[in-house]
Image: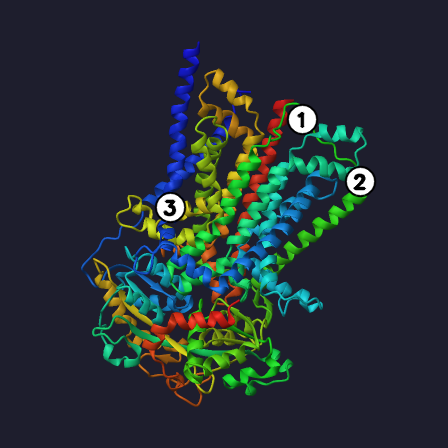
Amino acid sequence: MLNLKNNWKMKIISLFILAAVGVMMLVGCGDNNGQSDDPLSGTITVYTAIENVLAGRLVETFEERYPNITVNLVRDSTGVITSRLIAEANNPQADVVWGTAASSLMVLEDMGMLEPFAPTGLERILPLFRSDLNPPTWVGITAWETAFIINIPELEALGLSVDDIRCYEDLLRPELQGNIIMPNPASSGTGFLTVVGLLELYGRDGGGWDFMENLHLNIQDYIHSGAGPANMAAAGETVIGISFGFPGISRLQEGAPVAVVFPEAGSGWDMEANALIRKDDIHPAARTFLNWAISDEAMAIYNEAFPIIATGEGGSYYGFENQNPVDQLIGKDFVWIATNRESILAEWERRFGG
Amino acid sequence: MMVLVKNRLARFSMGQLTILILMLSIFVVIMVLPILSLFTRAFQDNAGEFVGFSNFRAYFENPSLLRSLWNTIDVSLTTTVFSVVFGFLFAYGVTRTNIRFKRFFRYMVLIPIFIPTIAHAVGLISLFGRQGIITGLGFEIELFGRLGIILSHVIFTLPQAFLMFYVSLEYADGRLHEAAESMGVKPLMQVIKITLPEVKYTFINTMFVCFTLAFTDFGAPVVIGGGYSVLATDLFVQITGLFNFNMGAVVGTLLLAPAVLAFVINRITNTANMGAMSAKSTKLVIKKNTLRDVLFFIFCSIIILCFLTLVAGLAIRAFTTFFPFDTSLTMANFQFSTTTGGIGSFFNSMQMSLLTAVIGTAFVFIYAYMAEKIESFGFLRKIAKLFSLIPMALPGMVIGVGYILFFNNPGNPFNFAFGTIGILVVANILSFFSVPFLTATGALKKLDKEFESVSDSMNVPRWKLFLRVTVPLSFPAVLETFMYYFVSSMVTISALVFLYTPAFRVASIAISHMHAEGVFAQAAAMSLLILLINVAVRLIYELTNIFYKQREKRRQA
């Protein structure tokens, strides 16, 4: 037994090892990230929560304008992007954080991770859409807001029509019991802005929570994703998804039988913002990118997907036929929100947690 | 003579000691230190000050914890019962009965581990959701929540339970059954008195694998669990929702509980005598029993039918324009938008999985050999065994964040690996270590200890024995391990989400992005591609195995 010549097996094993070594060597010749002083060339790493389709188009446009700059994009949900940035705080891998919730950027700001920077054209940005510091630590580009995504056939099956659902109170109709899905505010930025919006609308101390208690009676489920309720309404897995405009309008354009309603009394909202990451050797091309990211060219592309952009201009949009989308945003006290974030979430968890 | 023996022992021991320590050091670098760099935060406040157990106290005072804890135990236990029973019955069906299409059943039952878990959820929704096919037939269940999580977990863990039972049921000693037969023991009693004790070790291991996988998985609860909170979703919320790494670390340490328990129980059961393959074993002759065969055939068919509908659910989405609103056939969904990584991410996944499989298999076998087949260094080997069970209990998120905290530190000598494919491979090797380790240990236990004594007395070095005898004899288990690593790396998401770099995106992450953005058709199409490559690899595996068995037969003849 000991003398068996297991040649072919040995060959397979050696082949595996050879293959492994080969691939390892390929991997070894990775890219070298040489720093340069040139703001018009080099490679920068950008972290973003902007949806893939949109982010891809934007980066393409940027690279056409600045052909010698390569943008390495890490795209994920707001939660993953933010926690990655926090975990990497010791040795930041990102040069720029782009299009990520301002509430997240405030967390990074508190940790001293953002480098103040005033991008070219800052004066066009509405004061509401930038941090109070000068130069600002973060600058907003777009806002996203609570929207109801309604599956029309399923709603009609309940004996209601889309015209019956115009504002938050309409969500309390008894026919809708067990037919509304909402994101969990602890894991979804959209969920959080919706809860904050309700607190602002109906009262921070009692009224807002009372409203949510009533709404709770109609809730089918709270889920861990902001776009999820829109997608589930589009797929007919629920009747009304409380979500935000972009996924709802995207599903509508793809042919799902949905209507997207922005509540009449106003919407809770948050903004997507940009910031420069503080590190020892800041790549000058990162500033070039941030300048471009609030340019008219970039704003025009954001504007195709988001009715509200940080310059306050905007055209006519689905769901906003009669008003300027900016007017629909509920007045928002960012300082109050930032300081009370934990207690709001704890209270929500106490009342509605799974 | 005495002196000679002593010298030889001493010489062998030095070599073995070096390798054992090397193996343990690797584990310290790829698991202990990264995990500790996260878990030490459980004892710190936001400013990094040491605060003792106050985070734990705060967490335990929160009423939602008890609910999450109870929910987690509830779904994990239920999953374990179903997966272990179904897995055992299925494995029994394809090894110990005379049903037809055994090979077909054996291949098809693995489908769920060939596709990403998100695809299970998509499949379940197309069956049991409000618009689902089965719901349409008038059979309604409350899918989102507890039931959805359990279904997802059973789908995912059943094949793993099957694989473990299959390996141990396939090697049976016919003599016991012959003896029982001649003594007039009824067939059912034979199962209880002979078969069950035969697979006792596998039973316990399988229970812990299923329990721990269900206990720590966060994919299913996040996608299909709705508001039903479990410990893993608490971890998810703490880390990616509240950015509270301290509390996240607290939850992470709680998730380790089953692995520690598994280790303790493993220690107790391991002392019992293991049934090794003896040279005198005879092949089991399966008796004719029509009722038994019909029942098992129906059972296996139902399971496979369920799994196939999952694939059908994917196929419907992948090949139609926009299911269910526009069902015109199209191939357009296979043209992946480049922003998610495009088709390149698929080839990246293959490259990463191949590397993981090659290096991982070698590592697992050497490690298992050192933990199982060495006589001395009991203490070190106990540590090695404890280490081996922990990876199963580490949620990918803990590995991902731990790896960033540890490897991304500029002062770390291994910092060079961060941001390369290497770190992804290492994360995968660690994430999936436990199950192959158990497979390898099981295979090694079946090898007669005589080999070691003979080789020692003939002065043949152990590494030669390992390469020339141990590895060839456990070749099926080597292939199985290779397969497992490859397939799991193709579909995994959770650790990689924190570690992938823009230059090297992988398909499973692309699928999760497509799913999150509602591009279900592309997500389904990419899942089908992954299924395809996994099936292809499985086929190569089966052919190699057949080739190997014929080779063995010819040699014995």
Whether labels 1 and 2 belong to a single chain: the reply is yes
Q: Which residue is mark 1?
A: B281
**Circle 1 marks a residue in which chain?**
B
| Residue A14 to residue A119: above or below | above
Q: Amino acid at mark 1?
A: Ser
Spot the residue most to the top. B1
Q: Which residue is mark 2?
A: B289
Quadrant of the image occupied by residue A199 = bottom left
| Residue B224 to residue A6: above or below | below
- First along the sequence among labels 2 and 3: 2
Tags 1 and 2 in contact by the CB under 8 Å rule?
no
- First along the sequence among labels 1 and 3: 1
**In x, y percent, where is residue B124?**
61, 61
In-front residue for pair B522/A142: A142
Nearer mark to the viewer, of 1 and 3 = 1
Residue depicted at 44% across the width and 43% down the height: B356
**In x, y percent, where is residue A334?**
33, 77
**SS under mark 1:** loop
Q: Which residue is mark 3?
A: B422
